Amino acid sequence: MAREQFGVCAEPNLHGSYLLFNVLDNRNAFIRTALSRLPELFDDYADQFSEANLTGVVAIGANYWDEFYPQARPALLKAFPSMDNDDRVAPSNNVDIYIEIRSDRSDVNHIVCSKVCQLLADSVELIEQVQAFRFLDGRDLTGFVDGTENPQGMQRRNVALVQESDDANFASGSYLHIQRYKHNLTLWSSLKNEEQEDVYGRTKVDNIEYESDKKPLTAHTKRTSLKDENGKSIEILRQSMPYGDVKEQGLFFVSYCHSPEPFEKMLKSMIYGDGHGHVDHLLKYTQAETGAAFFAPSLTFLTALGNISV
């Protein structure tokens, strides 16, 4: 049975480092071998700095997959669903490789990021690096708890990982979507506390969700808390973290799921609304500047890449 990459379902950390690469021409064989070595690299540093709770994730971009591994493709893998409606935009970017490193020590993250870049060497171009951090008790920089709706316990694996019965070749992998949101905290701070709570649909300090009949149809929790045709909640596993400095702040949004469909439905609900003009009012105060889709294959798949010749 394939083993998942441990970082997919891991509990939150204090620090996150996100590396986004594009692969240079004719370096695919080198990349496959290099990526096959990353799980061991992560394990070595996790053992060396055991108190840091280090985890890593490696994912392959939807637009790069066929070139990277032409033998087979995850059944539901597709490009990021870019969307545009009035002033609400979800752009799509081409990113070949995504590497996520999380731990409770920023210096350990820096060491591992440096080793990853050394390993990939001149076969890639680093197009973006985002350093993120845990804010207060797991809150976004808006002051509200992030990831409140995340599945817990074993349900995290059920939500995040592809099952053997759905796609045997890529079991224990996960469909990944990322977006880097930039917040307008000056505008956000101009709202009264009650107005901010109405935007989210839950209280700020004690994180209590509004009763359904009291929740505005434009609330973030209303637009993202969706149900399927059988009345079952549609879930994703968020591993998002705030980023920024005193000049620019935002959220690096990370979504893992056994299918890309739940994320796409939530994004559509936020940007296009319910067909009656009720869109996500949180998007008045934050803007997605990037977006990309990936597949994070199983640990078993990754470690076997070094033995593949294409």
Image (spheres, helix red, strand yellow):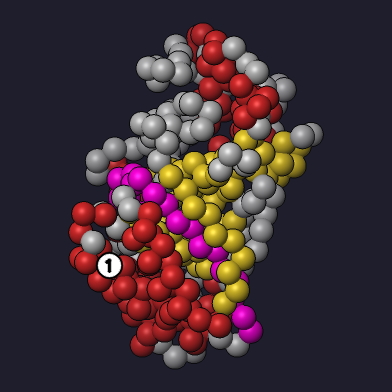
Q: Quadrant of residue 63?
A: bottom right
Badge 1 crowding class, 10 Å Cα cut-off, few under 14, some 14 to 19, many 20 or more, is some
- Say whether residue 12 is magenta: yes
85 to 132, vertically: above or below: above
49 to 138, vertically: above or below: below
Instruction: Find residue 119 and report its horizontal and vertical position in percent.
Output: 43, 79
Instruction: Find residue 71 and report its horizontal and vertical position in percent.
Output: 49, 80
Quarter that holds the N terminus: bottom left
User: Residue lying farthest bottom?
Assistant: 309
- Say whether residue 135 is magenta: no
* Residue at x 58%, y 69% (from the top left corner): 126
Q: Is residue 222 visible?
A: no
241 to 79, vertically: above or below: above
Q: Is residue 32 visible?
A: yes
* Residue at x 35%, y 45% (from the top left corner): 14
Q: Which residues are magenta?
A: 8-25
Label 1 belongs to which residue? 45
* Residue at x 62%, y 52% (from the top left corner): 291
